[in-house]
Image (tube, rainbow, N blue to C red):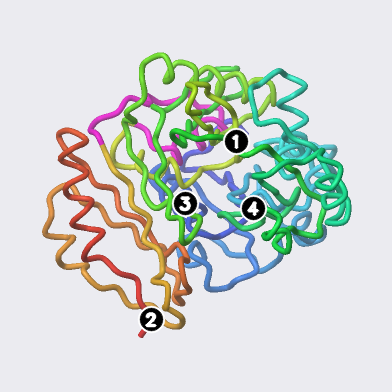
Amino acid sequence: MSQKISSDFKLGIIGGGQLGKMLIQAASRWDIATYVLDPDENCSAANLCTKYFKGSFKNYDDVYQFAQEVDLVTFEIEHVNIDALNQLTKEGKIVHPSSKALAIIQDKGLQKEFYARHNFPTAAFKLYETKEEVLKAISANEITYPFVQKSRKEGYDGRGVVVIKSVVENDKIFDTPSVIEEAINVEKELAVIVARNNKNEITSFPTVEMEFSTEANLVEQLVCPSSISNEVEEKAQQIAKKIIAALDMVGILAVELFLTKTGEVIVNEVAPRPHNSGHHTIESCYTSQFEQHLRAILDFPLGSTKLIQPSIMLNILGEADAMGKITYEGINECMRMEGVNLHIYGKRDVKPFRKMGHVTILGENIEAARTKAAQVKKVLKAKSL
């Protein structure tokens, strides 16, 4: 079916969280019907999509049957049943990004091997199956402190990652198949959102600088444009474009990178979907990451990624002691500020450091945006009733 706008075309989105919600918001501008599969009837996207299907994206039958209802399948979360996607692809169902690319990205071990095979710069690593193997490798001096352990599968939003600084922290080591990486001396954490369509057109958004909450191990805010040099910007952009091409992937790819203290740009990991590091694009760029993903998977020309105004994106995280029904403080104060754009995800319950929404703050320059962001951060709180 070539006509997707104002037609009978049905876009299937696996996962109904905030990324699915914002993807639906972008699709609704073009009058595209959206179907969503998610286990939670109260998920962020449930009341916004054309049709909601209750089911698990990890379950073969749920994913397979859901796909029978739609013309094209995409996803907002990596943890989708690969066997179902493979079978759907064999039967001619359009799946973007492809199950082949997703299989590599789902497994951080395969991801790292992919980088090594294609000579992409990344931290030195080794793969281990159990905690016992890791401890033996430490005893044999094959692993030296400090190091980073990442679960090969199921990690998300900082979960499944631990930094082991010395022997006294060995009790934190996971007993699961994992990647052990050398700890990198990081100057800045960066991200590039890159898109590719079936015509092999590739575009990328300006590199953003991510600032983390050490308490929550999550991105607290991001800055665009970043303060990196033109040389570092070019390196980051080229790495991202080469990765999406090597994956032969159609859609949006978020490429997270480290700028080391010695000036190297190396790959941390990637996500084959819209990403937290691209939320600011809704207001700050001519094309949002969500629209760009749709353009890519629906065979439309890719949109302009130029920055309209400098921006800061703040994640609205649940307070450390929040648990239960959500209430927001500081909404009125934020709405009085020019260039402050609130996005509330619609999650009814708050937990410590749970992502409840985000705020994009625009300014004439990054210093002006930072000043407003500091005010927003001071007043805006996600608490429990």
Secondary structure beneath dot 1 equals: strand
What's the distance in space between the residues labelled 4 and 2, CA to CA?
Answer: 27 Å
Judging by the rendered image, the residue that carries numbered circle 4 is 161
Please tell me the numbered disc located at residue 268. Answer: 1
Q: Nearer the viewer, residue 43 or 6?
A: 43
- For the magenta stretch, what is the residue range? 287-310
| Of callouts 4 and 1, the N-terminal one | 4
Q: Amino acid at mark 2?
A: Ser
Image quadrant containing the C terminus: bottom left
Image quadrant containing the N terminus: top right
Disc 4 and disc 1 in contact, CB within 8 angstroms: no
Q: Amino acid at mark 1?
A: Asn
Secondary structure beneath dot 4 equals: strand
What's the distance in space between the residues labelled 3 and 2, CA to CA?
Answer: 28 Å
Q: Residues within 10 Å of mark 4 (few under 14, many from 20)?
A: some
Q: From this viewpoint, is residue 68 visible? A: no
Position in image of residue 59 (x %, y %): 79, 61
Secondary structure beneath dot 3 equals: helix
Would residue 160 be counted in the magenta stretch?
no
- Mark nearest the camera among 4 and 2 is 4
| Of callouts 3 and 2, the N-terminal one | 3
